[in-house]
Amino acid sequence: MASDAVIRELTAAVQRSPEAVELRLHLVDLLIQQGSVTEALTHCSAALAQDASNAAALNLLQRCTAALATGSAPEAPAVRPNAEFNWSAAEEEVSDIIGPAFVDGAAETVDGEGAADFDVVRRSDVTLADVAGMEAVKQRLEVSLLGPIRNPELMRAYKVNARGGLLMYGPPGCGKTYLARAVAGELGANFYAVGIADVLQHWLGDSERALARIFDTARRNAPCVLFFDEVDALGQRRAALSNSSGLRVVVNALLAELDTATSSNDGVYVLAATNMPWDVDPALRRPGRFDRMIFVGLPDTEARAAIVRMNLRDRPVERIDPASVAKRTDGFSGADIAHVCDTATQLAMAASLRAGEVRPVRMSDVDAALLQIRPSAGPWFDTARNVVEFANGDGTYDELANYLRRKKMR
């Protein structure tokens, strides 16, 4: 039996790489052997959500079911002649009900991410056409970034270049990272996503060297969209960092790389996302750095319906009405809607385990999930209202103010 330490390490690895199905299934096997069947069942559900026909995952789910029924963790035999579940028949049953999955028959939305591509720099095959709704945001991206870059002769005629970066801000879970990937796809450029852990290091000087390596990698792979997520954590206001000289140096290093005198950032398009733009150092928003800001608000009706489709597209569903769900989720972020879909799927799976037969996710499951889940963006908008009211003297947040006015959030 695996030790607790091994299981902890595997759990941490799965959290870091949730798309690694085989690693997750190995963890499920060890959890079943340990007797942690409920936890194993959760991971098994996540694996089947990614690959509903995975034979190993189906076999492990059978073992979980048997363990729950008997109160013990069974061994992993190759064949279980006395199994309570006939999974071959169950798979055929699932395939029969996938056909009429969505009642309105619209096309599915595909995110286009290659699961086998583990390079930090990769081509993006997502474009703005794959982003449902959000027309105002797309138009801003076209005018402020994509249009000039697509017309280099026009830039030459006006003697301007594509220097500077673009900062997307808004409530969490609303698709800022997906939009950055779409921008890379529109430009036919590589996409390099950078998180906090890629920059911030333990030892003095390592963070600055990591930042320099990141920009060097982007320059070597130009044209490249270099995307910084949660940039407020890397570029915090230096006035608030009086007791953290290390972070002040990181901010200075980021400023130097964005507006460098020793290297050329030609072909490197720097995008960043933040939930808290008011915490970003003002020097990062001066010309030549993140000199353009775009507000990314909550998904509109069309986008919400597409998010429902995307999150249920590989699961056994029956007569789900995405348009109806979209109408009932006004005020929900994209992450909230994904949580509704996951919860509905878990409810259907629990019912299948109780009944001993597979049944699809139905609107009744979605209804039950909606009773449990509330929009999560409220606290963000509370802060945003205060910023618009008391800290918008220079007009930085006029776009946010107009959004709040249209949504009657002020």
Image (spheres, rainbow, N blue to C red):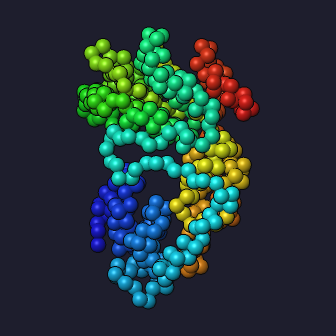
Name the quadrant of the C terminus.
Answer: top right
Q: How many marks?
A: 0
Identify the residue at the far bottom of this view: 82
Q: Quadrant of residue 349?
A: bottom right
Quick one: 148 or 381, which is closer to the camera? 148
Counting from the top left corner in percent of width and height, residue 353 is at: 55, 75
Quick one: 220 or 247, which is closer to the camera? 220
Q: Is residue 113 above or below residue 70?
A: above
Residue at image location 37% in from the left, 36% down from the top: 190
Residue at image location 59% in from the left, 57% down from the top: 341
Q: Is residue 107 left or right of residue 31?
A: right
Q: Is residue 98 above or below residue 138?
A: below
Counting from the top left corner in percent of width and height, residue 163 is at: 42, 18
Q: Is residue 258 left or right of residue 140?
A: left
Identify the residue at the far right of this view: 408
Name the quadrant of the N terminus.
Answer: bottom left
Residue at image location 66% in from the left, 28% down from the top: 385
Q: Is residue 233 visible?
A: no
Q: Quadrant of residue 346?
A: bottom right
Q: Is residue 252 above or below residue 107?
A: above
